[in-house]
Every structure is written in C-alpha cells, then in structure tokens.
Image: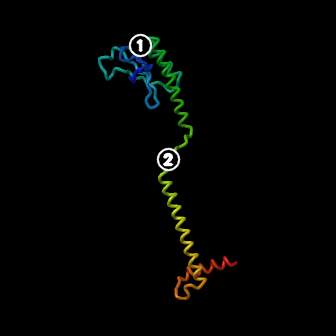
Amino acid sequence: MCRNKYNLTGTCNKSSCPLANSQYATILEEDGTLFLCMKTAERAHSPKRLWEKVKLPKSYSQALALIDEHLAYWPKFLVHKCKQRLTKITQYLIRMRRLKLKAQPSLERVHKKKEKRDARREIKAERAANLDKTIERELLERLRSGTYGDIYNFAPKEFAKVLDKEEAEAE
C-alpha cells in the first residue's frame, strides 16, 4: 500500500506511483470539494507548481466530462483510474451527506461512580428519616403515658401539629 496522498489506486507499483511517473493525474477531495490534480514534466522544475489543481463540478456527469477534456491525450489507464476514483469518492460523499441528515442517537456517558454515591446517600437519608420518625413516635408515646409530666415546655407549632395528627388518626 502506498501512502502518498496523490496515489491514484493506493497500491505501490510503477504504473500507479506519482513519484515514478512524470505525467500523472489523480482525484483529491478537500472538505467535500473534488479536484483533478495533474502533474506534467514541464512543471517538474518547480515543486510548488508541480501539481495543477482543477476544481470539479458537483454534478457527476459534468465532472466526468471535465476529466475527459483535461486528460484527452493521457494514458487510458490513468483516465480510467481517475474516473473510478471519482465514482468512489462521489459515492462516499453522498453517504456522508445522507448520514448527516439522519438523526444519530447521541450517546451519553453513564456515571457509575456518581450513581453509586447518590444511591448510598439516598439509603442513608431514608435511614435517617426512619430514625427521626421512630424518635418522634417514641416521644409521643412517652408524652401520652405521662412519663414526663408537665415539666417540659414544647414549641406551640410542633405541639399543635402533633395534636392535629393525633386527631386525624383518631377519626
């Protein structure tokens, strides 16, 4: 496999190597835009201008016509491979656009540590609530039985609330 970005087929052999051939053409895709890149011997003296880039139209048939026009007198192998590459890149661009339009399910992370911690806190809070209720019941029982007598002064709101609960339970 050849890793040169201008390689047309991806295989490393003499006929499809951009480094071994002085006349070469390929199709490149940059941000969804297709380019026909051509290399000729006349531009070999200037590495900056070695590759001539021609922007291809979005229409597949117009792009094929443009490839035929620019590569009219080039080897048939290169023309054929450029058209194959154009077809393949056009198809994957279509797939990319289709996938963007489709609603993808967004994946959310499961915070196991946080969930365990919250669950433990809930259990502790329930235990504390049950303990408070147990203490309150025990105190009410002692008040009813007269264990404390009249020696304690209770907050009027809480005492009224307790009396209301007792009346509700009695009914």
Q: Point out which mark residue 109 bears.
A: 2
Figure quadrant of the C terminus:
bottom right
> Farthest residue in the right direction?
171
Q: Which residue is at 58% across, 85% downward?
A: 146
Nearest the viewer among 22 and 122 is 122
Q: Position of residue 31 (x, y in %)?
A: 44, 32
In the picture of the structure, the residue carrying the numbered disc 1 is 15
Q: Identify the image quadrant of residue 1.
A: top left
Q: Which residue is at 52% across, 44% downward?
A: 107
Q: Point out which mark residue 141 bears.
A: none
Secondary element at image label 1: helix
Q: Position of residue 160 (x, y in %)?
A: 59, 81
Q: Position of residue 42 (x, y in %)?
A: 33, 14
Q: Position of residue 40 (x, y in %)?
A: 36, 15
Is residue 70 depicted above or below 96 in this figure?
A: above
| Amino acid tagged 1 | Ser
Nearest the viewer among 64 and 148 is 148
The answer to whether the residue labelled 2 contacts the one labelled 1, judged by CB atoms less than 8 Å apart, is: no
| Amino acid tagged 2 | Arg
Q: Distance of mark 2 from mark 1, alpha carbons? A: 49 Å
Q: Residues within 10 Å of mark 1 (few under 14, many from 20)?
A: some
